[in-house]
Image: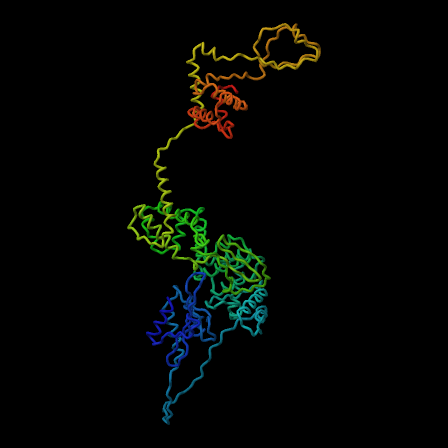
Amino acid sequence: MELSDLTAYAEEKYQIKEEFKWTDFPGFSVLREPVSGKWVALLMRQWDSDSGTQIELCDIKCGEETLLDAQFAPYLSSPFRMRGTKWAGLRIDNSTNSEVVFQLFDKAMQSNTQPLYNFSLGNEATSTTTLFKETPLPQAPARPLLPERIRTMTQICKFEKNNSYFLKCKRFSLQGDYMEDYEDDFPCDEEFWCFLPTYHDLTIKQIRGYFTWRTQLRRGEFRCSATPFAHIYFYELLNGIGVSSPEQAFQKMEEFKAEFLDSGAWSNLHKPLFEKWMFEYAVIYGLPVENALKYASPSWLATDKAFGSLRKAEAATDEEVVAALLAFAPKTTASSPVFSVTEDKGKHLFAEAWRRAASQFSEGGKDLFTLCFGAAQTHSWYPLTNAVYWERRQLEDVEYTLNDYHHFHCHNGFWQETCFSATSVDSIRIKAFLHETDRKLRKYLKAGSTLREKKDEAWATPFVDAAIEADKKAAAEAAKPKITIDLSGLAQIRQDALLTQNSLLTEEERQEEAPTPLVRTACAPPAEGSCNAASAPPQEPTPLVRTACAPPAGGPCNAASAPPQEPTPPCEPPAVLTARSFRARVPLDEVQTTVLQLLLEGKNTKELLKAHHLMPSIVTDAINEALFDEIGDNVLECEDDTISIIEDYREDITNLFGENTL
């Protein structure tokens, strides 16, 4: 329902026209009774910058007793602007029943229209004699007893003349502290309604009924009762009554929500309000952010997520970027054939176009995100203003971060909210980007009908073209045949090839490849002057074998007269280089083979290459090319004319020379 429905009803039924009496307040108007000229309703229209919607309210002259009528409870409250017992407040939104509003307006019109009576004085007398009989009066119901604790509680702040909202909250908090541990046993199951209910607003019967219900609740007996009882209990938790810490208060709020609101024991109309209080309580008391996020406004979180996906598009998925764009786009964009025909590819190209534009486009020193969505705005924030809550702490300067795009901070006792606002969105620029992207992608993907090109959207064309070119290259690359090389069996293949090669060698080739044995004796040096090497007769050259010998005894040693010794077992296996067999397997010349040997031994190759007038880079490329079929990758690298082995392939090169370590 909207206020325009009420004005149309008033004009049609009562010939009352809406009057705009204040030029400074164009959203305010009145409906007056045509005969007496008295106001019947005050209509108010206010723009809510947080939600980006218009709030419509109405003060209607139907009597405050209407607030006690259960059928009007979801819509009525205390008057917003008017004062007195004849007025009630009415919130107009999608959930408001127009028939209820029209009924209340009829009641207001009847209360403003006084019937006229004509009296005539005459001497006519009636002959009828009326006899009156005594009739016993019914006995008045017994009034509930008033416990002394409750009597004392009602005296707190009783004589305060100020009846402000602040005093209402303060009085409730002080009375709640006094009755924190009170228990009662006087059930009251009658349903009633009261706006912002406190102890002060209840009758004695209702007060005792509340404390009885609270006693049972604290004992774990969850029993549904009058709706104001739930509000009073929640107000107590907000004010820290009956709990030892904010964490415990929040825990009890969640328990109450689970037992009564989530289970459907009470009307779901109260659930959003209670969750709003829980969110604000978590913020002002600095509870963990996950507690606040559970009860934050879904529209807030969705907007923050959309801003985050567009501001940091590189880290967001295609789905997130497209969903964020569509959140600020005309409804027709979501039905584009680019999404319905091409599915994920269309979303990917839309997201890629935005990523390129967001990172590269700028105008007047501002990037595309700032041009489209502006900067974060800071404004006053008033938590728990629609609840009975008294702030008795000395507020310190604090910062509460809900997410990267939503912050709350308290400074000098006042709360502020910093966030991106949907009202500051440049919808024209976003629409231009989406329209040009949609136009180009329809043509590229051959999806749907073509769109008309617009000159003022040309700034977005290069970024869409870049996304399309990247997609074409990716498609061409994907179309190339893929060659897969399995390197897991290379070692076995090399071993089998070596055995085959050795089996094909002739006896003469084997003898030519056999290296001259070297015998290295590892003996302790003789004592000084004990051995005359000059006088020793010349010996036939013997194979040099590396042996492990014990050092000689301390006496003199005559090498010439020493009997020949049997060679002892070698200390380590002989190092045998199979360079020729290596060259037989790999197409390398002698110099290239020597280069590999020197590198395996950790020696420098510059002198060798200089002597043969060779360039290091050319030799490196030749060796890498020759070994590629064996190893499948480059094994050498050349930097600043210095050749070195890539360590990952040292073992593979060693195995090519043979099983012995070089």
Residue nearer the viewer, 97 or 601: 601
Q: Could you tell me which quadrant the N terminus lies in?
A: bottom left
Residue positioned most to the front:
613
**As drawn, 44 above or below 635:** below
Residue that appears at 39% across and 88% down? 130
The number of discs equals 0
Q: Is residue 572 left or right of residue 336?
A: right
Residue nearer the viewer, 602 or 618: 618
Picture coordinates of residue 552 (x, y %)?
Answer: 67, 12
Picture coordinates of residue 168 (x, y %)?
Answer: 54, 69
**As drawn, 488 above or below 204:** above
Residue that appears at 57% across and 72% down? 158
Q: Quadrant of residue 29?
A: bottom left
Residue positioned most to the left:
449
Picture coordinates of residue 518 (x, y %)?
Answer: 56, 13
- Mark yes or no: residue 13 visible: yes
**As drawn, 478 above or below 638:** below
Residue positioned most to the bottom:
123
Residue nearer the viewer, 492 or 579: 579
**As drawn, 415 above or below 344:** below
- Mark yes or no: residue 219 visible: no
Picture coordinates of residue 231 (x, y %)?
Answer: 49, 64
Protein image colouring? rainbow
